[in-house]
Amino acid sequence: MADGAWPRLYSCYKCQNHICCHDDIVSKSFQAESGRAFLFSHAINVVQGPKEDRRLITGLHTVADVHCSDCGEVLGWKYVKAYEQLQKYKEGKFVIAKFKIVKANW
């Protein structure tokens, strides 16, 4: 890392397991069932649940819930497939509810 700086991370609010890096935020203007959420290009220390088709605000998507690998808390979901061309950029990315993560290393 440049000049010894550590990456700014987000951790699971329940167990402090590292989940994502601030630099991997694609968008801060997403909505989860419970409020604001962030779209991340990558997530670590998560376990993916079964895939299912879900009708979201932006249309039909195949998604899989993601859980913290340590405590099992549902943190959000991963976009597996977008059926509308304009939504394809979401494929492979993670929506994490803002209230489910806390800043670490800031």
Image (cartoon, grey):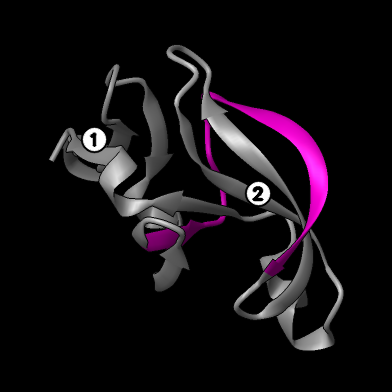
- Residue 58, image x and y in percent? 65, 80
- 80 relative to 66 in the view: left or right: right
Q: Which residue is mark 1?
A: 6
- The quarter holding residue 7 reads top left
Q: Nearer the viewer, mark 2 or mark 1?
A: 2
Q: Is residue 1 visible?
A: no
Q: Camera-side residue: 9 or 29?
A: 29
Dot label at residue 66: none
Q: Camera-side residue: 16 or 106?
A: 16
* Outermost residue toward the bottom in this view: 86
Q: Which residue is mark 2?
A: 78
> Which amino acid lies under the numbered mark 1 shown in the image of this protein?
Trp
- Residue 34, image x and y in percent? 37, 56
* Number of numbered discs visible in the structure rendering: 2
Alpha carbon distance from label 2 to label 1: 26 Å
Q: Residues within 10 Å of mark 1 (few under 14, many from 20)?
A: few
- Residue 1, image x and y in percent? 31, 39
- Element assignment for label 2: strand
Q: Is residue 89 magenta?
A: no
Q: Identify the residue at image location x=43%, y=13%.
A: 71
Q: Would you say the magenta stretch is mainly helix, strand or loop?
A: strand
- 9 relative to 52 in the view: left or right: left
Q: Identify the residue at image location x=81%, y=48%.
A: 52
Task: State the extent of the magenta-drawn residues as a range.
Answer: 36-55
- Element assignment for label 1: loop
- Residue 31, image x and y in percent? 44, 68
Q: Identify the residue at image location x=67%, y=67%.
A: 90
- 99 relative to 18 in the view: left or right: left
